[in-house]
Image (cartoon, rainbow, N blue to C red):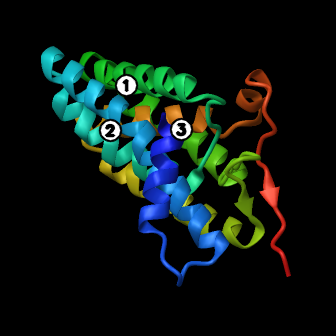
């Protein structure tokens, strides 16, 4: 159903000015929105009922920003993506309200995440590869965000928890062990066509 809607919307929005690469990016964007919309609606509904709406909105901003630049593993199926994404956000939203991360632990989390993002970011997949000319700018942006998040998280409480959980969660999605467990090829780099 999602593929059908994606194809219909892509053909509707396609103009003669777009080459095949641009059409593929358009199709991927539409597909991403269609796949994430039900998950987002469900998450908002559940989190409103559980009093976790504010943490969820903060997680969308903080986690979404770091994931945009560091990329990472994707589930192989839309259902797998739905389940994994929903559980990830619900767990982080809940934990952000019930834990209190002390400064020393926060510093350890930051040091770990800084090293992980420095070494493994950006990490692609075969379906969503990182192109060789994207590596340096994406790495600079993701590592810069990690450093920025450290300073934002110096204020203890909800904001520190959100920052730490966002970084920890995304660090799991870019390390080679996760790709190995999921039987996926990790860190996939696509050489640019000359």
* Residue at left offset 45%, top offset 45%: 5
- Which mark identifies residue 160? none
Q: Is 155 rendered above or below residue 102?
A: below
The relative height of residue 91 versus residue 105 in the rendered view (above or below) is: above
The residue at 65%/40% (across/down) is 174
Q: For the residues marked 1 and 3, what is the alpha-carbon distance in whole angstroms?
A: 11 Å
**Residue under circle 1?**
92
CB-based contact (under 8 Å), mark 2 and mark 1:
yes
Which label is found at residue 59? 2
| Relative side of 103 to 54, left or right | right
Characterize the local packing of mark 3: few (<14), some (14-19) or many (20 or more) Cα atoms within 10 angstroms.
many
For the residue labelled by badge 3, is the local secondary structure a helix, a strand or a loop? helix
What residue is shown with label 3? 170
Query: Which of disc 1 and disc 2 is earlier in sequence?
Result: 2
Neighbour class for label 2 at 10 Å: few (<14), some, many (≥20)?
many
x, y (%) of residue 186?
A: 78, 41
Q: Quadrant of residue 122?
A: bottom right
Q: CA distance from mark 3 to mark 2?
A: 11 Å
x 48%, y 59%: residue: 10
Given residues 124 and 25, the one toward you in this image is 25
The image shows residue 112 at horizontal and vertical percentages of: 60, 38
Q: Quadrant of the C terminus?
A: bottom right
Which class describes the residues within 10 Å of circle 1: few (<14), some (14-19), or many (20+)? Answer: many
Residue at the spot 61% in from the left edge and 32% down from the top edge: 172
Q: Earlier in the sequence, mark 1 or mark 3?
A: 1
Residue 142 x %, y %: 54, 57
Distance, label 2 to label 1, CA atoms, is 8 Å
Disc 1 to disc 3: CB gap under 8 Å: no
* 136 relative to 166 in the view: left or right: right
Q: Judge whether residue 56 can be spotted in this image.
A: yes
Q: How many marks?
A: 3
**Rendered image quadrant of residue 49:** top left
């Amino acid at each position: 159903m999602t593929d059908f809607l994606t194809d219909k919307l892509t053909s509707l929005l396609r103009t003669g000015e777009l080459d095949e690469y641009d059409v593929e990016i358009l199709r991927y964007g539409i597909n991403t929105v269609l796949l994430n919309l039900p998950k987002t609606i469900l998450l908002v509904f559940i989190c409103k009922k559980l009093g976790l709406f504010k943490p969820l909105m903060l997680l969308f901003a903080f986690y979404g920003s770091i994931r945009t630049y560091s990329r990472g593993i994707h589930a192989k199926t839309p259902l797998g993506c739905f389940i994994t994404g929903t559980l990830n956000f619900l767990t982080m939203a809940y934990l952000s309200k019930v834990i209190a991360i002390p400064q020393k632990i926060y510093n350890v989390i930051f040091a770990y995440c800084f090293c992980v993002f420095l070494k493994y970011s950006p990490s692609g997949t075969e379906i969503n590869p990182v192109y060789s000319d994207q590596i340096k700018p994406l790495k600079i942006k993701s590592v810069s965000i990690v450093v920025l998040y450290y300073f934002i998280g110096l204020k203890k409480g909800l904001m520190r928890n959100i920052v730490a959980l966002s970084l920890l969660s995304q660090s799991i999605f870019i390390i080679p062990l996760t790709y190995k467990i999921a039987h996926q090829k990790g860190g996939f780099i696509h050489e640019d066509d000359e």
